Amino acid sequence: MRPRGQHHYIRSVTFPHFSGSRRGKHPLLDITPTYFLCSPLLPREYKRRVILCGPIGSETDPLTGTELGVFPFRVDRGEDIKAFKVDERQDLLAVVTKCSVPPSVELQLIQFSRGAPHPSARTPRIPFFFPGGQKGFDLNCMVQINNDHVGILVTIVPDGPFPRSQRFFIINWKTGHCKIDHDAGTSEMTSFSFLTFYDLRIVATNVRDSCIEIWTVRDGRLHRAQTLQLPLRAPKVLVCGLECAPLAPEDLIPGRRQTESFIRFMVSLGPESGSTFVCMSIIVDTAYLLAFDLRMRAVTPWLEWGYRNVFLRDDTSSVEDCNAMGGRHFVSKTFSEEDCYPGTAPNVVTVVQVTGCRPQDVHIEFRFKFPKGVPELNGSTTVFAERIMSFVPREMAWSADIKCDRVFVHQQRLFAITDDYHKQRTTVDFYWF
């Protein structure tokens, strides 16, 4: 390990994860200020029916032992955990499950300290989505908690050559009332994050139209209030993927300064064939997003909102886990200087602490390039058709060589994940920096 900056190894946990040949099927994870939770695939069923839980420890109180305990909550046979989220402040575990017979999706509201139905929830099990006569489909779900409300994005993944579709829900978890049921169509909404504790403003990614959108709730409906366009792309260049790393519940507590939180948008770009060759992150101050005037719908080009106002990263060679969150710290995992050759896994982990952009900050120009020889681009390596500027973060927390498959960071803790497909298990190492 080559440390740059102070950091501490806390502990390591190992748990079974029977993914079989499904190498893209990772365990579901969640992190709170105190606990680490995961829901692995079980053998034979290849479903997630249990949640494992254990304390994280701290730099002053490192823990020993590599086992996680089974959380006292288990879904019924035939059900499959698709997503879950913990809000320690409200002692709430929100679990989204898929039921096969009849086809439905439920929100289960659990008291985190006891593993029993939450006493503040009028209806601890809320069936909120019924796919109807669709057969042979899977679901991807994203769930976020903001005070009395739970936001759920459901992506229907049908068998065969059919497009995915999205539905977005906002449910008052105490009353059981479904406040929003929004048909997001095909790839209109691919991820989301609540922006503030005080209302239901959300920011969402739209890969179909290649933009970032700010939505508000008005008169019981979801309204698109602001559309933030991505940089203009060169001819024959498409946005292949667009997702955001959402704010955690502890970033939305009352009284917390919004300047302490940032949201990261991950953009994948490639030629019209659909292959991805360039990945970048756009990291935006939450306070900057909240400052947009939402009284009238507007479409804002990149040069008006993104130029010199965001922090950019080239993540083309980076590997990060899908459980990445917003906040103030962001991590990348790239090639080390001595191991930078084809076929070598990236293993240099770098954590950057981002602070708000100020007029006196240093700015640099990013020049994203495709590799030479992409047939569809006729020899061109240009990605964008306009200038891309980024402010330079003023502090790097630390950098070290860590051999793992994926990483993500939450507050001042880094989690390095290693998958052992031969032994069907996953190991997570915890670091404090």
Image (tube, rainbow, N blue to C red):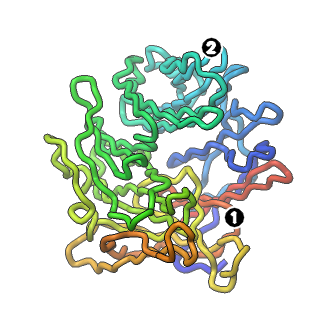
Mark 1 or mark 2: name the one nearer the start of the chain: 2
Q: Provide the residue designation for mark 2.
A: 102
Residue type of the residue flagged with mark 2: Pro
Going by the image, does 12 lie left or right of 351?
right
Going by the image, does 62 lie left or right of 248?
right
Q: Provide the residue designation for mark 1.
A: 404
Residue drawn at the location 30% of the way across and 43% of the way down: 196
Q: Which mark is residue 252?
A: none
Residue drawn at the location 73% of the way across and 73% of the way down: 343
Q: Name the spot of residue 1 as percent of width and height, x first.
A: 67, 77
Residue type of the residue flagged with mark 1: Cys
Q: Name the spot of residue 219 as percent of width and height, x first.
A: 22, 24
Q: Can you say whether 114 is above or below 296 in the image? A: above
Residue drawn at the location 53% of the way across and 36% of the way down: 164
**How far is mark 1 from mark 2, CA to CA?**
40 Å
Please name whichever residue, 155 or 84, is drawn nearer the observer in this view of the structure.
155
Number of other residues with Cα within 10 Å of mark 1, as a class: few under 14, some 14 to 19, many 20 or more: many
Residue drawn at the location 50% of the way across and 49% of the way down: 33
Whether residues under marks 1 and 2 lie with C-beta atoms below 8 angstroms apart, the answer is: no
Please name whichever residue, 322 or 249, is drawn nearer the observer in this view of the structure.
322
Kindly indicate the quadrant of the structure image that contains residue 39. Answer: top right
Q: Name the spot of residue 178 as percent of width and height, x first.
A: 38, 20
Q: Name the spot of residue 60 as percent of width and height, x first.
A: 57, 62
Q: Secondary structure at mark 1?
A: loop
Point out the residue furthest to the front here.
378
What is the count of numbered marks?
2
Number of other residues with Cα within 10 Å of mark 2, as a class: few under 14, some 14 to 19, many 20 or more: few
Please name whichever residue, 416 or 22, is drawn nearer the observer in this view of the structure.
22
Q: Can you say whether 288 is above or below 45 in the image? A: below
Point out the residue furthest to the bottom here.
338
Point out the residue furthest to the right here.
422
Res. 370 visible in picture:
yes
